[in-house]
Image (cartoon, coloured by chain):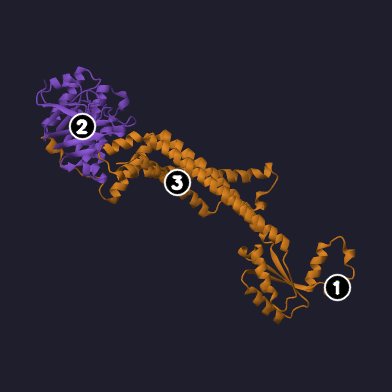
Chain colours: A purple, B orange
Amino acid sequence: MIQLHNVFMTYQRDATALNGVTLTVPRGEFVFLTGISGAGKSTLLRLLYAALKPTRGQVVVDGQNITRLASAQIPYLRRAIGVVFQDFKLLPNRTVLENVAISLEVLGWGKKDIGKKVYHILKQVGLEQKIHTTPLRLSGGEQQRVALARALVNDPKILLADEPTGNLDDENKEQILNIFREANIRGTTVVVATHDRRLIENSHKRVVVLEKGLIVEDSNVPK
Amino acid sequence: MSRNKSSKRPKLVHEGFLGRLNYFIVRAILNIRQNIFVNVLTIGTITLALLIISFFLLLFINLEGLADNWSTRVQVTAYFDQELAPQELSTLRARIQSLPGTERIDYITKEEAVKRFRARLKGQESLLEGVTPDVLPASIEISLHRQSRDNLAVEAYVTLLKKIPAIKEVQYGEEWVKRFTTFMNFMRLVGALLGGFLVLAVVFIVSNTIKLTIYSRKDELELLGLVGATKLFIKAPFLLEGIIQGAAGALLTLVILMASYFGFLHNAGNFLSFKPSDAGLSFLPAEYIAGIFFGGMLLGFLGSLTSLKRFINF
């Protein structure tokens, strides 16, 4: 589902974020990307949803080579990927329903179908009661779950999450992790970037450790 | 299992041109409602900017009308030694009428010339003792078309007129025509310069206001791109929003302009002690009103289009 071959990513002024990363994530796998801040986790995720193009190397996602992808094709690739952003990226002047509905509106769904689907996914994340609330009136954990609902509502093939449990209490963390697990059980490939060791230890999933833009460890069970 | 069930393709409402257009219009109206403050601000700016141009146009149109009124005084008079026989007169009339630029011809007999002369010297009739109709020559007064009233056109016309053998002398107030032409050219130049500057200022102000409103929603633009919206899907509602803002601004402009104009006409008699009906004032012609309306829409559309380019770059 995801293949990176000898990927280098250098930002302006020679700041190197990835230094020759090679990684394969098969369809339906659950992977944690971990490492200290600046290790290259977020850059790697951004490469996967084509927000960046690698300086060198090949990135293949859902059978499409990001390096050679025309800009007009990027939206179609992104429709197959749900992303949970570190800063949530919720629109403050829209309700929870409208925030989640965006992912379906871009696909051309009708209002009725959107209503049903959004209600269904909000029920899964336990927010069906807050459907007409604006994000500013929600707690951090609730906002995170809205962001998750938006990423999952169109049943993406791949789910990417960047520090999804930052600043959340243990109860909320567990709830978020369960939602990831359920999505994974339904067949979604999940890649979660986090430096939260406790989250990883409880999950018993594959862990890829990044350090200074290089993969230094790749195992199914964390040490 | 849930995945398979929900992956079933639902009925898509954005399919086809009309489906898409309908969605974009609904989205644009929703966007306006959700961002009412910025939209009111933008419409207000567009209204103020268009009002400046509209007031200028109204002033310019009325000044032109006034000058057009004055230009009817540009007249060419051809004199004859003798009274013309009816046959001669009709031949001459036809010949003058065929000259390019001729609008109207009035034949003034010797008797009529003396009558006019007497009317002008009313109160000093003693000066006219012994004056017989023979003293003043018969003449033809020619009014020219609007486009033939500047000094070069009049000179060319007079040259053609002088070639007609029966005409002994031609007069046309050369100095006045020259001064009038200079004044008109100056007025048009000042109008074009001022108008040009105003249009530039308005385009600058409106496009920057729209840029700021779009900047305030850059997160929305970014998010739409990240969840897989195509460029058209992101841009279209914003462009429609710009068009709606422009149209609303233009309508408000026209309402304020009309209210000010008719309010002025109504009150001018009281505080300026002048009769607007005598001054020949007029409101903007229909094509200018349409121009302001569509100009407003175009301004909104182009303002949005140029601003969006900065934020959509995938």
To the question of a shared chain for discs 3 and 2, the answer is no
Give the percent coordinates (x, y) of residue B138: 77, 73
Q: Mark 3 or mark 2: which is in front? A: 2
Which quadrant, please, contains the C terminus of chain B?
A: top left
Q: Quadrant of residue B305?
A: top left
Work out whether residue B135 or residue B221 is closer to the camera in this orientation and state it.
Answer: B221
Chain for disc number 3:
B
Hey, which residue is sitting farthest top in the picture?
A170
Give the percent coordinates (x, y) of residue B161: 68, 73
Residue ID for mark 2 = A19
Residue B158 vs A68, above or below: the answer is below
Residue ID for mark 3 = B299
Mark on residue B132? 1
Q: Is residue B307 left or right of residue B79?
A: left
Contact between labelled residues 1 and 2, with CB atoms less than 8 Å apart:
no
Task: Identify residue type, mark 3.
Answer: Leu
Task: Identify residue type, mark 2.
Answer: Asn
Q: Secondary structure at mark 1?
A: loop
Chain for disc number 1:
B
Q: Secondary structure at mark 2?
A: strand
Few, some or many residues within 10 Å of mark 1 (<14, 14–19, 20+): few
Q: Mark 2 or mark 1: which is in front? A: 2
Contact between labelled residues 2 and 3, with CB atoms less than 8 Å apart:
no
- Tell me which residue sits at (42%, 35%) in the image: B38
Few, some or many residues within 10 Å of mark 2 (<14, 14–19, 20+): some
